[in-house]
Amino acid sequence: MSTDETPETGTGDGTDRPLSEIGVGDSREKHLVVVTESGERIDRGEVYVRHTESAYLVSPDVEFPAAETTRYRKENLDRVEISQHHSNCFITTAAAGEGPTLDSLRGFRAEVMRPTRSGRVLLWVYEGISPPVAATLDRHPRSTTTRLVRRLVDRCGALADCRRAATGAAERAALSVTLICLYVVGVAFAVLGHGWLRGRELAGGHGIN
């Protein structure tokens, strides 16, 4: 396994940013287990995680000080197992599971939606209606509803990454609006699909899709 144990404050692309600003993460503590290609299982416990295209950055400190940050190169890993208690991304987690997409969307929520009144209202509605919807999707992972919601979630994650990488204010604003609209559409579709699936369940339907 290859990890970068040496202090590092840049990305290697000519920029000079602290590690806490490199990659994608949501500033929430997670329980992380790393499994290497050779099968070695490394339980990192409760840590903060950010990810880039090529590596995971892991630190016990949310500021990711270089001396306390380990870089795990993705090419040398079999998988990573990430779990987090008290997640409010109910539908997203049920449709797509934990991972980079969920981290990207959590970052967007924290940076764009949470600071504004309208964003907080949308999140309040989402967090209020999502638990039963997520439970239904989790029971029917292969249903048409869950598959389509998963595609919408993946698209939202990609847009969140594009917004984060954008340098122009106008481009970032346009991507934010597009992402919020798609977010609302996805939640509405998930709610409608939940109603259909629950109706079939209560009616004793078989082969639900």
Image (cartoon, rainbow, N blue to C red):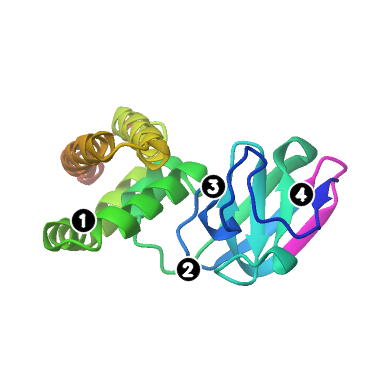
Q: Is residue 207 visible?
A: no
Viewer-proximal residue among 17 and 159:
17
Residue type marked 1: Tyr
Residue at the spot x=18%, y=39% of the render?
A: 177
- Disc 4 target residue: 35
Residue placed at 55% from the left, 69% from the top? 62
Choose the circle earlier in sequence order: 4 or 3: 3
Image height of 24 relative to 207, above or below = below
Give the vertical position of 30 relative to 40 (above or below).
below
- Residue 104 coordinates in the image, percent (x, y): 43, 46
Instruction: Please state, as top left, top right, bottom left or bottom right, where the C terminus lies in the image.
Output: top left
Q: Is residue 12 left or right of residue 36?
A: left
Look at mark 1 in the image and give the residue it sits on: 126
Residue type indicated by callout 2: His
- Mark 3, residue position: 23
Front tag of 4 and 3: 3
Q: Read off the magenta span.
A: 36-43
Q: Amino acid at mark 4?
A: Val
Q: Name the kind of residue labelled 3 in the image.
A: Gly
